[in-house]
Amino acid sequence: MSGTTKSPWLLHYDASSCNGCDIEVLACLTPLYDVERFGVINTGDPKQADLFLVTGAVNDQNKNVVRQLYEQMPEPKVVVAVGVCACSGGIFGDCYNIIGGVDKVIPVDVYVPGCAARPESIIDGVVKGLAVLEEKRKKISEAKS
Amino acid sequence: MTTIESILMAVAFIALAPAIGCLLAGVDRKVSARMQKRRGPPILQPAYDVGKFLSKEQITPNSTQDFYVVCFLLFTIGTGAMFFAGMDLLLVIFTLTLAETFLILGAYSSGSPYSQIGAQREMYVAMAYEPVILLMAVCYYLEYGSFSVSDISSSDGMAVVPLIGVFLAFLFVLTMKLRKSPFDLSLSHHAHQDIVRGMATEFSGRTYAMLEISHWYESVMLLGMVALFFANGTVAGIVIGIIAALLAWILEIWIDNGFARMKWQTALKSGWVVTLVLGMGNVAVLLI
């Protein structure tokens, strides 16, 4: 079934981001970029999401939230780290409460750099994530059969 | 209608309604996007979504939830099949309510507070729209002396003329029944609002796909009820009915995009005011 890549539903979580990347994620949904034309839906429900977009460096207080959201998502799922903070901790990397990139907590498939990440690069990251998603789906269906 | 015709209509509904419902849902998303100056997804997007959900992993909080959602699907299909087969309208309405009850039970069966609040709101909304749907059946009986859909659809004259009050009231509650803004408080199409996805918060994978397919069947059956107001036993009546149903669908999309969500109190009050004024008014006029 090729439906997987045709209807990617996003779950967006702000893990102590400065809100710059969050605004750019939401900008993707505006009439200018309109990611819904690719079937993308910005859902808030982890149980119905395929892609997990995390912005910001993870801190001690929300690491469990990130982990729980990831665990609630059904397979196949892909994690996209949006912005340099989510990739490596960025400018906040040395703060006492910051753990570092999202990959310190959950496995990340696609890294989207930028401060803030531009909508074009976020869309690009999502499209790269779709290829990973399709690969994972194939692996799961092969394992079943 | 003869028995064979009835069976053929029921089979045609079961086979064609998902395709029509899927296209209607696709048109909904496309028109909504254009209203917001966006390009919008392809018309077949709802089918892609359901295809994806069928291939996803299934996470259910408990085994009964699946049972309730399967019942919701089966009873929705049954309701539509009975309606298009020309059976008793009262039976159709009661089965529709039963299907609804299964969905509410499915939402209640999970521990998620969002799902629970969604189920509670759905019951309030059901309290708002059920009286209108029942009065519709009463008015049909007063006018034609029969509850049978096949009798009503083959009678002389369009029912919309003597039943204009109930028709307008039905258009009003159609927004609640299709769960569109301003009355999408139990199960929003956008899962990043006050109660996430409402009743469907804990639905994933196959369960969610079944919910979507049930909605396709439900939309076609509800639009069929709109068309019944125009059926007068001729082909022209059916064509006018279909056109009216499609116009009602566009109207619902317009309302959906033009209004913010309202509280359940507003849904309940406005539903009952509409029932009392338009519904009961129409009954009174028919009795006089």
Image: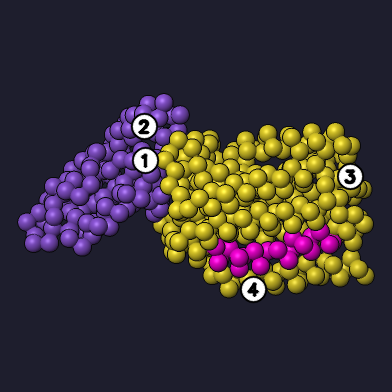
Callout 1 and callout 3 share a chain: no
Task: Tell me residue B48's x, y (percent).
Answer: 49, 35
Q: Residue at x 74, y 60 (%)?
A: B133
Residue placed under numbered mark 2 in the picture: A140
Say which colour chain A has. purple
Which contiguous range is marked in magenta? B119-139
Residue placed under numbered mark 3 in the picture: B154
Q: Are marks 1 and 2 in contact (CB under 8 Å)?
A: yes
The residue closer to the viewer here, B274 or A140, is: A140
Spatial CA distance of label 3 from label 2 is 54 Å
Q: Residue at x 69, y 37 (%)?
A: B14
* SS type, badge 4: helix
Specify the amino acid type for callout 4: Lys
Q: Residue at x 68, y 56 (%)?
A: B98
Spatial CA distance of label 2 from label 4 is 50 Å
Spatial CA distance of label 4 from label 1 is 43 Å
Q: Main secondary structure of the magenta part?
A: helix
Callout 4 and callout 1 share a chain: no
Chain under callout 4: B
Residue placed under numbered mark 1 in the picture: A75
Callout 1 and callout 2 share a chain: yes
Look at the image and tell me whether residue B42 can be seen.
no
| B130 drawn magenta | yes
**Mark toward the viewer: 2 or 4:** 2
Residue placed under numbered mark 4 in the picture: B269
